[in-house]
Image (cartoon, rainbow, N blue to C red):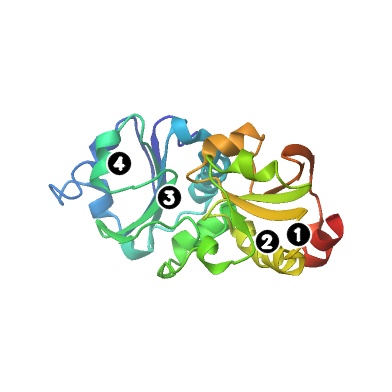
Amino acid sequence: MSGFTKISIFSKNLDFTTPNFRDIFGQTVLKSDNSFVAEHANVMIFFHALHASDLCADVMIEWDLASAELQNETADDDEPAEQEYFLAALDCDAYPDLKEREDATYIPHIMYYQNGQVLYKDLGTQFRRNKEGILQYLKNPTKPEEKGITWDQQTENVNHLTAETFKKTMKTFKHGLVIFYTQWCGACKEAKPEFSKAADELVGDNKVIMAGVDCGPYKSLCRLYGVNAYPTLLYFHYGKSEQVYSGKLFLFKNIRKFY
């Protein structure tokens, strides 16, 4: 059963499905009683939308797999209510009013509700976005890391490009390696330090540019170059994309040898 064409809730104790998210969620704030979210201790909700399908698709698949596994777990009638866990999904194109009311500021967005109240929000980088990561966090939620300075504020020698600056910048360099990433991507977190090391090593070579593009705000630019997984590294020659970098986990020594 898909959890994305309509709202689907799964737990080891309950298989509850409704085509109308308002029926179970719309009253969590206005009327805390008679609300599914308010009546159940632990509910994690994935806010997705068709207009951001390139960012949502992979998560949707894993969310569905996690939901199915949760549904198939052995029921325990004596289990306390506080140990019940539920996964849900909301189509923000269908219900933009609920997206706005719940302050899902961007898509995809994940929120954790406990006893009818938002416990944690903006959980995109708090766990690996696969079935195992979703289920692990659902059952053991932790406070999100404090938002600090972003990668573009941390690096001196990685050129962080926008849709406006990308082409005119890249065409001036004989060699260019670009990392296309998102803020929520766990593998991107592992790749960034290695990429930064390579950029530091290559500083001063005016034929080379090491650049980064955040595919959150610049989705169209990433799509233009066929980026559909993160991180993706592309090599450019005077602004023209030549090949995909495929070094093992973007290790610094491999990146340095790429030129």
Discs 4, 2 touching: Cβ within 8 Å: no
Task: Using the rendered view, name the quadrant where residue 239 is placed.
Answer: top right
The relative height of residue 92 versus residue 188 in the rendered view (above or below) is: above
- State how far apart marks 2 and 1 are (Cα): 7 Å
Where in the figure is residue 217, as x and y percent of width and height?
A: 47, 44
Q: Residues within 10 Å of mark 3 (few under 14, many from 20)?
A: many
Q: Amino acid at mark 1?
A: Leu
The residue under the point 42% across, 43% down is 107
Q: Residues within 10 Å of mark 1 (few under 14, many from 20)?
A: some
Q: Residues within 10 Å of mark 4 (few under 14, many from 20)?
A: many
- State how far apart marks 4 and 2 are (Cα): 32 Å
The relative height of residue 190 versus residue 246 in the rendered view (above or below) is: below
The residue under the point 51% across, 34% down is 53
Discs 4, 1 touching: Cβ within 8 Å: no
The mark nearer the N terminus, 2 or 1, is 2
The residue under the point 47% across, 55% down is 124
The mark nearer the N terminus, 4 or 1, is 4
The residue under the point 52% across, 55% down is 184
Q: Amino acid at mark 3?
A: Ser
Which residue is labeled 1 in the image?
249
Which residue is labeled 4 in the image?
99
Which residue is labeled 2 in the image?
191
Which residue is labeled 3 in the image?
11
Discs 2, 1 touching: Cβ within 8 Å: yes
In the image, 232 versus 171, the foreground residue is 171
- State how far apart marks 3 and 2 are (Cα): 35 Å
Helix, strand or loop status at disc 3: loop
Where in the figure is residue 200, as x and y percent of width and height?
A: 70, 68
Helix, strand or loop status at disc 1: helix
